[in-house]
Amino acid sequence: KDVSILGYKNAEEYDKGTANNKSILKLIQDPFAHKLFELKEHGMTKREIVKKLLETSYHNLPKALFIYLPIFAFFLWLFHNKKKWWYFDHGIFTLHYFSFLLINFLTIGFLSYVKSSFEDYLLITIPLSIINAVLIIYGFLYFFIAHRRVYQTKGIVSLILGAIIFFLNFIALTFLVTALGIISFIMIH
């Protein structure tokens, strides 16, 4: 109920106080602030806003991954032999890997739901937490395993190349997830 942005308690105060601000961040900050004040006027608490944001982001994640497919394939294309591997081949690898990731996210989401249903039973929640942790770690390792098998690179070269590709994709995906979070927040109703 005491939601404020930069010390402003409502949209009118915010608009008056930031009217002279010509920052580039204003392009993101203004829609965010107006949406936050709109949700506040509808009686939503901070906890409800965060819950809605997480729900909306979770539902938009497969769409974001679909948008990201060609970018991921492009990074693979940059680091592999252009005569041996066509961009199309990298697209197939990307579809395979992202299919695995979506199944992994689905499994983790299902296990988290089951875990939340049995919060009082440690004999159920502890193994489910361990399984979720293993699935998350395996989701990261699977890229390196699949990359080595598909592209048939040897040992340390595969690891270094995979790490560079993974790092570049991590940075690009961070920008995409940030944009997804902003869009998801604006889409909350």
Image: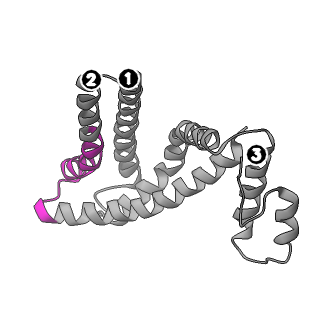
Q: Quadrant of residue 116?
A: top left
Disc 1 to disc 2, how far (Cα)?
Answer: 9 Å
User: Does residue 138 appear to the left or right of 176 in the view shown?
Assistant: left
Specify the segment rendered in magenta: 135-156
Magenta-drawn stretch, dominant element (helix, strand or loop): helix
Taking the spot 38% from the left edge, 30% from the top edge, the residue there is 112
User: At which x and y percent is residue 81?
Assistant: 29, 64
In front: 180, or 51? 51
Q: Quadrant of the C terminus?
A: top right
Label 1 vs 3, first from the N-terminus: 3
Comparing marks 1 and 2, which lies closer to the viewer? 2
Disc 3 residue type (three-letter): Lys
Give the class, few, some or many, for how many residues have Cα within 10 Å of label 2's Cα (few <14, many ≥20). Answer: some
Label 1 vs 2, first from the N-terminus: 1
Magenta stretch encompasses residue 166: no
Disc 2 residue type (three-letter): Ile
User: Does residue 159 appear to the left or right of 165 in the view shown?
Assistant: left
Q: Can the viewer see residue 87? A: yes
Mark 1 falls on what kind of element?
helix
Q: Quadrant of residue 82?
A: bottom left
In front: 148, or 124? 124
Q: Which residue is mark 2?
A: 124
**Which disc is residue 40 wearing?**
3
